[in-house]
Each structure stands twice: as structure tokens, then as C-alpha cells.
Image (spheres, rainbow, N blue to C red):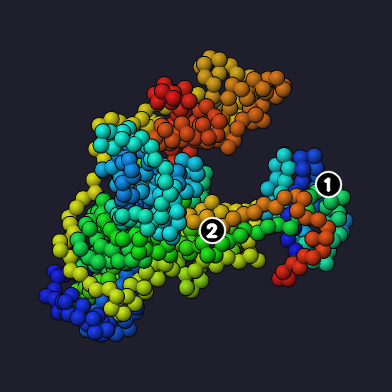
Amino acid sequence: MVRLLLRFGEEIVDQPIVSEIILELKVPINIITALVNSKGGEVLAEVPQEAMDKVVAALRKRGATVSLPKLIEVETEKCISCGSCVSLCPVEAITLDNELSVVFSKEKCVGSTCSACVDACPVKAIKSVKQNNHELINSRLKGVTGKKR
Amino acid sequence: MGELKLKPQKNARTIEEINAKIRKGDAQVLTAEEMKKLVESSGVEVAFKEVDVVTTGTFGAMCSSGAIINIGHSDPPIKIDRAFMNDVPICHPGAAVDLYIGATAMSETQPYEYGGGHLIEDLVNGKEVELRAAAYGTDCYPRNSLKTNLTKDDLNQFYLLNFRNCYQHYNCAVNSRDETIYTYMGKLLPKMRNATYSGAGELNPLMNDPDYETIGIGTRIFLGGAQGYVIGEGTQHEAKSQNGTLMVRGNAKKMSSEFLRGASFTRYGTTLYVGLGIPIPILNLGLAKKAAIRDEEIFTNVVDYGVPRRDRPKLAKVSYKELKSGAITVGDKKIKVSSLSSLKTARKVAGTLKSWVENGEFYLTAPVERLPLDNVFKPMKQTESTPFVVNVMQTAVTCRETEEVRAIAERIVTKSVNHIVVVDSLGKLTGIVTSWDVTRAMAEGKTKLADIMTRRVVTTKPNEPLETASKKMAQHSISALPVINDEGKVLGIVTSEDVSKLLGM
């Protein structure tokens, strides 16, 4: 599966775009997080690797912006392994190992749409980098090698 | 704890004997964690016979920390009145060029991001920092202002001087409110969805010598990666409730940022993480027993930081074993808990101290004076009372959800209020409606209250400080808060007008 960050502007946010695409392409799309209101929406979704191109094309046809989600970035050399972030993570992407070091799992992290841990780090070792809409172009998408799970 | 209250036994080992062994490289040193394992496997008698020193450690945010520096005299000289280093305001409590960097002082240009703790870390790392100072000028110190760049090598003295460190144990924090709060105990999610705690538990220095037999004034310790000293009990020290603290000093020029880190807690401010370790000489069997204490024997209270009062409600008692397991239970609720202090670095402190003693780089000292055991940590004497919600709240004008908008409009006029609180048959809060909502409903031709009322209501409680209630109203851009009890029953209402009258805001 590949993770995609979908953004819907104010003018299309009331349309059932993801549902339409699921029905039309018969592709399972797994919504991981969603922040939607009348002003627009930001959805983190997983799509099968092989169906990615046509899903992206269908989303764009309907006016959505598609980009690769930037996950949370952890500067390990700054981290003091206090663990303040551990209890805030809703998906257990942050844990303590046997050595009591804080371990961050990129696979489990739902990325910048959550960011619950970011403002809890006392040494500012965690960053959520929101990607600009224009950052993703077709050529970049083609190079994606999503982690198989 | 009964058996730990034994009278100090006749010492079977002396500090001089231990130091002689250290000199020869023969001293038997264990970290506190190793000691506990040995006692469990071989018994306390064996551990007592075999072990000379147990090393302890902790690494946590310690706000009552700072550094005293002397920067030398300028020409012409200045008697500093106001000073900033990297835009952090610096205290000038003494003579012309003696300054104190407080860990919690925040940069005026980057508040909440950079503060005294970061400044101390930068100096420790050899970085250059900018000093700006101003003065009123005297006959002997004529200069009015000054700007210069300094590193730690330019300072005559650079001593960490912390007036409260090494809390023996600390609260576990939760938040019962409906909103996330940011505290000195970190980020606390609403409705007790997470918990935080601080402290190293069985690794904490004071937990391993709870009767202060070996830790006193003059005890040589590990401080920030260098050798330092205990110079007294810390402020708020209360040994009998296991809330002991230490005042410490150490040469910051020799410290390392691995054990001294500036930090910032979102919406709280800046602080300093301090690594502190103490070697406990196992002078007698009693000390061996005490140094065997386990996390399951150390308890702390789960405290509701959602209540902004001095005496916050205590919701449960948990052991450090539970805390370190990652989850605690409060009532029938399982809550994920995380540590604010670093247990990994606490271990490293104990381990480093152990190697220092083994390698003959660190000798033990006997205290020149014991620390007080019977101190009481008193609350503040207040000569002025502060207002709480209960002091200004008024009777709420209420209505039921089934009423017509027209009836509400009439009530607003006859009672001359702007807010009507919606309640159910038990008097419990279900919503709120304002004169503005009613005006709009009239304009739009809506007639049912249920269609226009606000259901997600920001509320307050009678014992909430009025300042907190006032902040809530400002934060949510609203002008009144229903006052409810723990069951959600409406007790009254507090409006911004009432608050302004009292607080003059």
C-alpha cells in the first residue's frame, strides 16, 4: 500500500469524491486520518501500489490535490529519550525499547495530519513537515516505492 | 517502610576505608539497579558484605536551576542594572558583574523556544553568546551600556547553582478537562486520555538513602557530567513525606550537554534537564536494605492538573513499577502514561558515576552536616484573597430544549439577560442560547430552540479561579460560562461583565 495525502478545496469538499472513486475503480481506499470542515479537507489514505496511478488521476480529475504525505521527522541526535511523546501517540508508533530509548516507527505513524507528539517534545526533536501542494508532480509519484505490508 | 525506619546501625565500613579501596582500585561498586538484583538473588547480607558503593542517578527537568557567572570588569567599568544574554533576561542580584542565569527565564525574541536552560547548554558547549547590559551609572561605575560576546572561557566563574534539584518522587499528572492543557508536567490530553510522570523511581538518589544518613552538606555528587556538591537541602524539602530535594553546586565549565539540556515545554516555558547522581556508601546493613528498594515499593499520587488549584484532586495511588510499565489504572480506566524525565539517561548517570569510582576518579565524602528530616513544606501565607467563580456567579436563567424561540426571546427581555442555559428535567446542562442566537433565529424564521442552541458548551466550576474562567471566555470568544457541578448540574452562570467588574479587566 502507498500512503497519499489528499486535499480538497472549499468548492469540492461537499462531494463524495473518495466514495465515487472506490465504486468507479473498484479499488480499496483506506482512510487513515481525515480533517474535514466546510473550508476544505485533508485526508491521509492508503491505496494499493498497483492502483496508485489511476487513483491519483481520478482524484485530480475531480479537483483534489494529491501529494505524498511527509511523515513526522525525528532528529535522533537531539532526542533525550524522555518518552514524553509515547503516551500521546494514538497508533503506538512511538515506543520505548529494552534500552529505554525512544523508538519511532515510520510505518505506523499517520504523519502530519496527527502531529500529537510534536508540541510535546521538550527538546524540539520532532518535526511535522507539511508538504506544499505543488511539491508533488507526476514524475515524483512514479518513483514512489511504497512499503509493502 | 517499617523495617527501613531502623535506627542507624553501627557502621561496619567507613568512608575512609572505602576511599582507600577506591585508591587501590578494589572498591566494589554497583549501580542501584544492579544492587537490587543482587539483593534479590543473594540476599541483603551478601550484598552488604560484597558492595561498598551503590551509584544512583536521575535526569529530569529541574526548573529551579541556574548558573552564577562572573564576567569580569569592563573599562570603563559598569555596575550592571539590566542584562540580557542571547536576549534572555539575566538576574543581577549582587555586585557589578555577577549575574545569575535562571533556567526558566525566557528569551524576549523567542519566548517558549529559547531560555536560560538553552543559554546554559550553549555556554557549556563552548558557544559564543551575546551579552547586552544597561546601567544607571555611578561615580565609580560610569558606564551606561555595554555589548560584548562571551564564551565560557571568558567567564571567571561559571557554576551551576541549583536551589531545588533531585525531587525524591513526583506526582503523576492527568487532565479531567474537556480540552488539552499544557503544563510543566507536559501535554495532557482531555478526559484523562494520557498521563505523565517524572522521576527515576528506584534509581533516584534520595530514594536509596531516604533517611539522609550519607547525603548531606558537602556530599560529592555527579552533576551535569562533572563533579559537584550538595550544599544543603533544596527549597520545599520535606523528607518525611518522601519529598526530599537538594541544593547543589558544580563547575559548569567542566559539564557536558549530554547531562545538561535546555528544554521548552509548550505554553509553559523553558527549563533545564539536569543529570544528577549520588554514590551511596554501604556503611551498614540498614543502608544495604534501603538501597534495595524497588519501584513497586515507591508510590505516588495521580493528580488532576485540570483543576488549577494548589490542592489538586488526588485520584489514585500508583507505584513507579506501574508508571514504568506504560499504563496506569484510575478507577476502571486504563491510561497510557509516559515519563518526562529520561530513564535512559538516569541509567547512564549511575553507570558513569560507577565507572568514575571504579577508576579512582571519584572519591566519596562524608557530609559535614546532616540535612533536616523534620522540615514541613508550608503553603503560602496570603494576606489578600483571590476571587473564584463561586464569588461572582449568579443564578442562571434556564429553559428546556422543547421550548419555542419566541418564549426564549420573551424571557431574555423580562429577565434582562443575554444568556439562557438549556437544561434537562434533572437540571443538567444540555446547551446554551444567547440573545444573538435568538435575534438571528427570528431573522431566519426559525422557531424551534433545538435548531439554534449551542450544544458544545464551555463551562466552569464553582472552585475555579476567576482568572481561569476569564481566560476561557477570551480563548473561545464567548461572554458567559454556565457553572456546573461534577454531575453536570447547572449551579449558575458567570458572565464577562461580572468578571470585568471584579478583576477590572
Q: Is residue B366 left or right of residue A53?
A: left
Q: Position of residue B24 (x, y in %)?
A: 24, 84
Picture residue at 27% right of the left edge, 33% below the top: B138
* Dot 1 crowding, Cα within 10 Å, few <14, some 14–19, many 20+: some
CA–CA distance between discs 1 and 2? 36 Å
Depth check: give the residue in front, B80 or A38.
Answer: B80
Q: Is residue A47 left or right of residue B291?
A: right
Q: Is residue B156 above or below residue B420?
A: below
Q: Which of the labelled discs sits on residue A125, or is there none?
A: 2
Q: Position of residue B191 (x, y in %)?
A: 50, 49
User: Secondary structure beneath disc 1?
Assistant: loop
Depth check: give the residue in front, B121 or A40.
Answer: B121
Q: Position of residue B375 (x, y in %)?
A: 19, 52
Q: Position of residue B436 (x, y in %)?
A: 61, 22
Picture residue at 68% right of the left edge, 20% below the top: B442
* Dot 2 crowding, Cα within 10 Å, few <14, some 14–19, many 20+: some
